Amino acid sequence: MSMTTLKALECAKGQTLVCHYYPDKHSDPVFFTILRQDQSGGLQIMHNNQWVAVEPIERGLVVNVGDFLQILSNDKFVSVNHRVLASKTGPRMSVACFFTSAEPSKMIGPIKEFTSEENPPLYKEFLVSDYTKMFLTKPLDKSSLDFFRL
Ligand SMILES: O=C(O)CCC(=O)C(=O)O
Ligand SMILES: [Fe+2]
């Protein structure tokens, strides 16, 4: 195959890099995540300082609250800390759909409905792109929320 064929197909114009590294605790830097896991399980959420297994439900979907929903709601909805334990029994399949802003220049912060004089904003306003940058550079198990908390 000649280089011109590949060039004509624009073979390097779009790149997708996906790294999966789950065992560490994290919360998702999005509004919410819809998750489909297979029957092998492995997903755990932190509840009352304990890891709780999320039992797979056939054809069921898991909806996780993400950091942006926690920030928008000024901590009324809490972003879930979760992890996935590697299984020794074979391959595991999961599909995660992250709901976030398509516009990195969007500002996010606690919204009026969730703030008042008695309930002042707990987070500063920030750009979605700054949050994503923070998420990608901090240690995975450290909460990004803390970097934006007032
Ligand atoms: O595979 C899973 O069940 C969860 C994956 C996950 O937490 C993530 O991709 O952020
Ligand atoms: Fe996650």
Image (cartoon, rainbow, N blue to C red):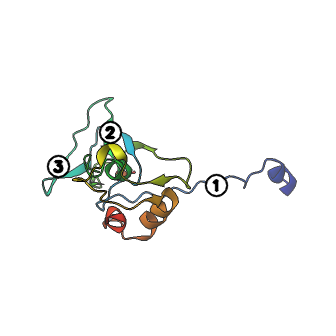
Indicate yes or no: mark 2 CB to ligand 2 under 8 Å.
no
* CA distance separating discs 1 and 3: 36 Å
Quadrant of the drawing holding the C terminus: bottom left
Eyeballing the image, is 127 above or below 44? below
On the image, the x and y values in percent for residue 10 come to: 77, 50
Eyeballing the image, is 22 above or below 92? below
Q: Which residue is mark 3?
A: 52
Q: Quadrant of residue 124?
A: bottom left
Q: Secondary structure at mark 3?
A: strand
Q: Nearer the viewer, mark 2 or mark 3?
A: 2
Seen from this angle, which residue lies furthest top?
59
On the image, the x and y values in percent for residue 29 come to: 40, 55
Question: Badge 3: how crowded within 10 Å, few (<14), some, or many (20+)?
Answer: few
Q: Secondary structure at mark 1?
A: loop
Is the Cβ of the residue at disc 2 closer than 8 Å to that at disc 1? no
Q: Quadrant of residue 135?
A: bottom left
What's the residue at 19%, 47% (across, down)?
A: 53
Question: Badge 1: how crowded within 10 Å, few (<14), some, or many (20+)?
Answer: few
Q: Is residue 107 shown left or right of residue 14?
A: left
Eyeballing the image, is 6 above or below 62? below
Q: Which residue is mark 2?
A: 63
Eyeballing the image, is 124 above or below 63? below
Seen from this angle, which residue lies furthest front?
117
Q: Amino acid at mark 1?
A: Gln
Q: Which residue is mark 1?
A: 15
Whichever of callouts 2 and 1 sits on the residue coming sooner in the sequence is 1
Q: Nearer the viewer, residue 140 or 90?
A: 140
